[in-house]
């Protein structure tokens, strides 16, 4: 009997999703003045991802920081989205995302570029599993709006496979052709 419970317990431990990494982006302390003094509360912003193309963000509020982080992490796991990645390291095409006054521009990058992004956007890319990207935040510097704008842009991204399937064509017809003619002209000159 104890052996069966132990096995069940181990399974539950495996289902605790250790495959997800999380990154705390911001903690905000708020206070409420009451008759006896001040009551403090905390709001946490967390980004969660599997570093293989899935990412989500969540926010949580509580009287204690660890509880706020736990709530934010749970919400982020529920709100995960899948993003297609090119070669598992960068974006398929350039994207612009927007949420409120937050605007972001994300560009695909060659291998070895690294993640060129600021604060909250960097957390999203690291949790997503992107290794090469160039991005710029234009507008609001509020971390909530920056993350929402980044995810707005990432959800607009489309892989060549999905575009080809929607148009009823082959992936080779969608992707630009690499012509051999310019190489031959350079060799003759």
Image (cartoon, rainbow, N blue to C red):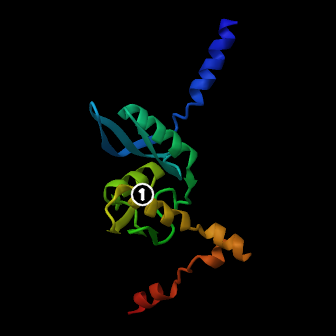
Q: Depth check: give the residue in front, 161 or 98.
A: 98
State whether residue 145 is above or below residue 171.
above
Where's residue 142, x and y in %? 34, 59
Of 146 and 175, nearer the camera is 146
Residue 181 in sight here: yes
Quadrant assignment, res 162: bottom right
Q: Position of residue 53 (x, y in %)?
A: 53, 53
From the image, which quarter does the C terminus lie in? bottom left
Residue drawn at x 52%, y 38% as measured from the top left: 19
Q: Residues within 10 Å of mark 1 (few under 14, many from 20)?
A: many
Asked where in the image residue 105 lies, by quadrant, the reply is: bottom left
- Tell which of 62 and 146 is nearer to you: 62
How many numbered discs, if any? 1
- Asked whether residue 20 is in view, the answer is no
What residue occupies the far bottom of the structure in this picture?
189
Direction left: furthest residue: 37
Instruction: Give coordinates of residue 30: x percent, y percent.
Output: 31, 43
Q: Quadrant of the N terminus?
A: top right
Figure check: 33 above or below 1: below
Q: Which residue is mark 1?
A: 147
View extreme (top): residue: 1
Q: Secondary structure at mark 1?
A: helix
Q: Is residue 19 left or right of residue 7?
A: left
Question: Which residue lies most toward the front here?
Answer: 35
Q: Position of residue 77 (x, y in %)?
A: 54, 43
Vertical order, 64 against 25 (above or below): above
Query: Residue drawn at (42%, 91%), measured in percent from left and top?
Result: 188
Query: Could you tell me which residue is drawn at 52 percent across and 49 percent down?
Result: 52
Q: Residue at x 31, y 62 (%)?
A: 141
């Amino acid at each position: 009997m104890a052996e069966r419970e132990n096995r069940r317990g181990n399974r539950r431990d495996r289902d605790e999703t250790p495959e997800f990494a999380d990154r705390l982006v911001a903690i905000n302390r708020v206070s409420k003045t009451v008759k006896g003094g001040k009551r403090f509360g905390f709001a946490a912003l967390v980004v969660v991802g599997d570093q293989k193309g899935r990412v989500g963000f969540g926010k949580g509020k509580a009287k204690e920081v660890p509880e706020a982080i736990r709530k934010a992490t749970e919400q982020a796991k529920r709100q995960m989205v899948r993003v297609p990645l090119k070669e598992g390291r960068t974006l398929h095409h350039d994207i612009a995302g927007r949420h409120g006054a937050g605007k972001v521009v994300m560009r695909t990058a060659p291998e070895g570029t690294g993640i060129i992004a600021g604060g909250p956007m960097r957390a999203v890319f690291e949790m997503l599993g992107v290794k090469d990207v160039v991005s710029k935040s234009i507008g609001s510097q509020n971390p909530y709006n920056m993350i929402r704008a980044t995810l707005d842009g990432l959800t607009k991204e489309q892989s060549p496979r999905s575009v080809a399937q929607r148009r009823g064509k082959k992936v080779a017809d969608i992707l630009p052709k690499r012509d051999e003619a310019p190489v031959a002209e350079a060799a003759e000159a």
